[in-house]
Amino acid sequence: MKKSVLTRYRVMAYVTGVLLVLLTLGVIAKYGFQLDGAAKFTTVIGIAHGWLYVLYLVVAFDLGSKAKLPVGRQLWVLLAGTIPTAAFFVERRISRELEAKAAAPVPAAAEA
């Protein structure tokens, strides 16, 4: 697996995660505090998050298929963009796992 696949996933995970946290704060401001301007903010951030989440799904699926992740782990990676702050934790865990796998020495039998 190329390092660029993991880099694309990491960027999209952070972008999606930040937008989802902003969206959550906007919804709290809109419905919890009835702040002026929160409705427009929530609309703009919601649309941006929605479109970028679709791109995140494509990138995460590409990562999962190239890294040969098990189905359960792949689903967790795909759903992480829907739970506020989950994308940050899942991204960190997946990145560490895949970087460790890439750094592991290749067995002699696999080289032949």
Image: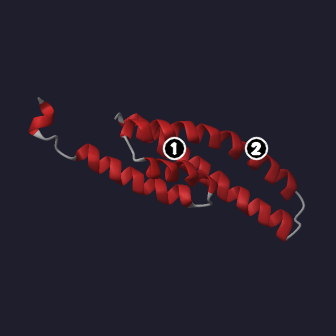
Q: Name the residue under label 1.
A: 11
Side of 14 relative to 29 (left or right): left
The image shows residue 60 at horizontal and vertical percentages of 50, 42
Q: Which residue is drawn at 63% across and 43% down?
A: 53
Name the disc covering residue 47, or none. Answer: 2
Task: Pick whichever, 13 or 111, lies toward us.
Answer: 111
**In the image, what residue occupies the spot 48% across and 42% down?**
9
The colour style of the image is: secondary structure
Which residue, as the protein is rendered here, is positioned at the far front?
71
Give the side of residue 105 with respect to residue 22, left or right.
Answer: left
In the rendered view, does 1 fall on the left or right side of 16?
Answer: left
From this viewpoint, which residue is outermost toward the bottom? Answer: 33
What residue is drawn where x is 11% and y is 29%? 112
Residue 24 x %, y %:
72, 61
CA neighbours of label 1 inside 10 A, class few (<14), some (14 to 19), many (20+): some
Q: Where is residue 51 in the image (x, y as percent from the top left)?
A: 69, 39
Question: Residue 66 sits in which quadrant?
Answer: top left
Q: Which mark is residue 45?
A: none
Identify the secondary structure beneath mark 2.
helix
Of the 4 image quadrants, the one containing the N terminus is top left
Q: What residue type is labelled 2?
A: Ile
